[in-house]
Image: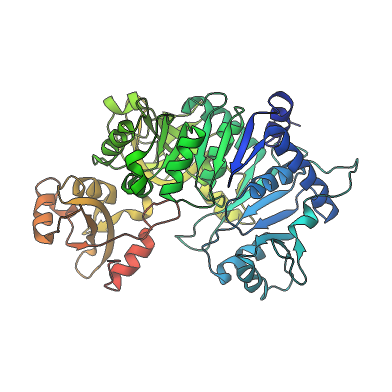
């Protein structure tokens, strides 16, 4: 064994903090001793049903305590959990299941029909395990929830064994399965705990779905520090306000749509946010939105709350850099400096490092990277070209080692031979007093190859004059960067974490829908 393994945190916490709350879900509080008992029971049941080192178990379900227990039980056996996005359609899930060759598919009655439809086309389908009502030809959750004790437990052979496969969103093609090792998760957790300022016994409020890397990687930060996670099936602003106050949560991850919905809730008037210390902010805009949100939280008792700006990706830790509150004062728009043990370089297309201040691809070296893409050697080789992991993000580094994310490579608009970074245009648009949020994409143009198009959401009570907005932007950035079209929308299509889904937005704008 080369180092600490993911599941060691459960046995260690059960030994040294047995009565400390570990996981709170739907009114049930599991101590670390009880958490460990659930994991041990699942180990027995899983082995009885054929799970061994390397076995892949897919999960199609909402957040739950049993989902978390399953993850740690599988890791302790050297098996691999494979969370599946519950928003996918059956053909997309079939594709993932076929790639995985999963032995089990764990689901619930809510998703049972979708699971069955996804299994139908498969020549060799995984055995379905359903939580809830036992159905024909299924295993019930109770079948794997316990089993006879045994002495010959399977286990990981190395901390380079995988414990999870997470499929990317597939916005640039078919989803790819990022293979995540114990090493990646443990090393990243140790570095990120210090960078985030995690304290022993901290309490996390988590609504992020467990098919997303962020959920597992924020959970591990408090778990590795004898802390507690308050888990909900999905985000609800009223429930968030209630649970943060009830359980004295210190930490949460927030994107603009989540924070806005909380402050717009009828319960916000009586909200108690006094326990909240750290807000991990998942957005990089330069509008005054975050300042307004921090002021709103401080007005509800969170006098010391500070925003941290983490940058990362599923394949890369996921934490690569972090900007602390004192960093942003002298380095506007930064996502901070690399975590301990992480190296960052800005490379050109040939793999050469660029001078400070020049824009190129953000590339990473670390012990906390994915092992590669599942059964995709060519894509893995491309991602790790030139000895670095290529993120697909464009950025620049300043002389003090502070990173600024400029854009996604695929979001860059090529118009009339010039490169336009969508984020730069978006950051200009949100300084307009009538604009609350903006997204910029490139659409086909017969003369220039692509034209810059902006979709914008108006501030409450405001209307957008496209011509006036175009003139506003033209006064502030070069004419070739200025949008040729401005479309007002009621909302923008988003990923599950609240980020704007630009591939969907582009398709809607091409169809003239504008999502509004």
Residue at image location 45% in from the left, 44% down from the top: 240
In the rendered image, the quadrant that contains the C terminus is bottom left
Q: Is residue 267 left or right of residue 202?
A: left
**In the image, farthest residue toward the front:** 270
State which quadrant residue 10 falls in.
top right
x, y (%) of residue 306?
A: 37, 29
**Percent position (x, y) of residue 212?**
53, 50
Q: Position of residue 30 (x, y in %)?
A: 66, 38
| Residue at the (67%, 49%) spot, across then down | 66
* Residue 73 visible in rendering: yes
Q: How many marks?
A: 0
Foreground pick, 207 / 174: 207
Residue 461 occupies quadrant? bottom left
Q: 477 left or right of 268?
A: left
Q: Quadrant of the N terminus?
A: top right
Q: Position of residue 166 (x, y in %)?
A: 58, 51
């Amino acid at each position: 064994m080369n180092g600490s393994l993911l599941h060691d945190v459960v046995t260690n916490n059960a030994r040294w903090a047995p009565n400390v709350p570990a996981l709170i879900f739907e009114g049930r509080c599991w101590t670390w001793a009880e958490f460990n008992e659930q994991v041990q029971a699942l180990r027995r049941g899983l082995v009885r049903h054929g799970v061994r080192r390397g076995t892949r178990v897919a999960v199609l379900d909402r957040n739950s305590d049993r989902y978390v227990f399953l993850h740690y039980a599988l890791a302790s056996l050297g098996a691999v959990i494979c969370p599946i996005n519950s928003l996918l359609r059956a053909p997309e899930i079939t594709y993932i299941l076929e790639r995985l060759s999963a032995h089990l598919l764990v689901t619930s009655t809510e998703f049972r029909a979708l699971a069955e439809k996804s299994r139908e086309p498969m020549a060799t389908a995984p055995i379905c395990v359903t939580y809830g009502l036992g159905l024909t030809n299924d295993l019930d959750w109770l079948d794997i929830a316990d089993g006879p004790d045994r002495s010959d437990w399977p286990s990981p052979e190395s901390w380079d064994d995988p414990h999870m496969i997470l499929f990317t969103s597939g916005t640039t093609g078919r989803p790819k399965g990022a293979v995540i090792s114990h090493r990646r998760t443990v090393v990243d957790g140790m570095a990120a705990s210090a960078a985030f300022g995690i304290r022993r016994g901290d309490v996390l409020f988590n609504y992020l779905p467990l098919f997303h890397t962020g959920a597992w990687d924020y959970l591990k930060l408090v778990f590795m520090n004898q802390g507690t996670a308050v888990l909900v099936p999905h985000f609800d602003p009223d429930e968030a306000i209630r649970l943060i106050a009830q359980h004295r949560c210190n930490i949460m991850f927030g994107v603009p749509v989540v924070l806005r919905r909380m402050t717009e809730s009828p319960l916000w008037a009586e909200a108690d946010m006094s326990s909240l210390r750290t807000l991990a902010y998942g957005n990089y805009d330069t509008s005054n939105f975050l300042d307004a949100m921090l002021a709103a939280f401080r007005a509800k008792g969170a006098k010391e709350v500070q925003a941290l700006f983490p940058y990362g990706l599923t394949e890369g830790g996921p934490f690569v850099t972090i900007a602390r509150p004192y960093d942003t004062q002298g380095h506007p728009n930064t996502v901070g400096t690399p975590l301990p043990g992480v190296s960052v370089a800005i490379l050109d297309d040939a793999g050469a490092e660029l001078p400070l201040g020049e824009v190129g691809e953000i590339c990473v070296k670390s012990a906390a990277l994915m092992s590669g893409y599942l059964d995709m050697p060519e894509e893995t080789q491309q991602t790790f070209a030139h000895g670095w992991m290529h993120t697909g993000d464009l950025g620049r580094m300043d002389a003090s080692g502070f990173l600024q994310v400029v854009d996604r490579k695929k979001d860059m608009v090529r118009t009339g031979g010039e490169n336009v970074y969508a984020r730069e245009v978006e950051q200009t648009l949100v300084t307009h007093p009538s604009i609350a949020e903006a997204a910029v994409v490139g659409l086909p143009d017969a003369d220039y190859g692509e034209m810059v198009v902006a979709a914008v959401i108006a501030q409450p009570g405001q209307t957008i004059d496209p011509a006036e907005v175009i003139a506003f932007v033209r006064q502030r950035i070069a004419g070739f960067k200025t949008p040729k079209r401005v479309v007002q929308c009621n909302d923008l299509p988003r990923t599950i974490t609240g980020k704007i889904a630009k591939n969907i937005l582009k398709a809607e704008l091409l169809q003239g829908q504008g999502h509004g």
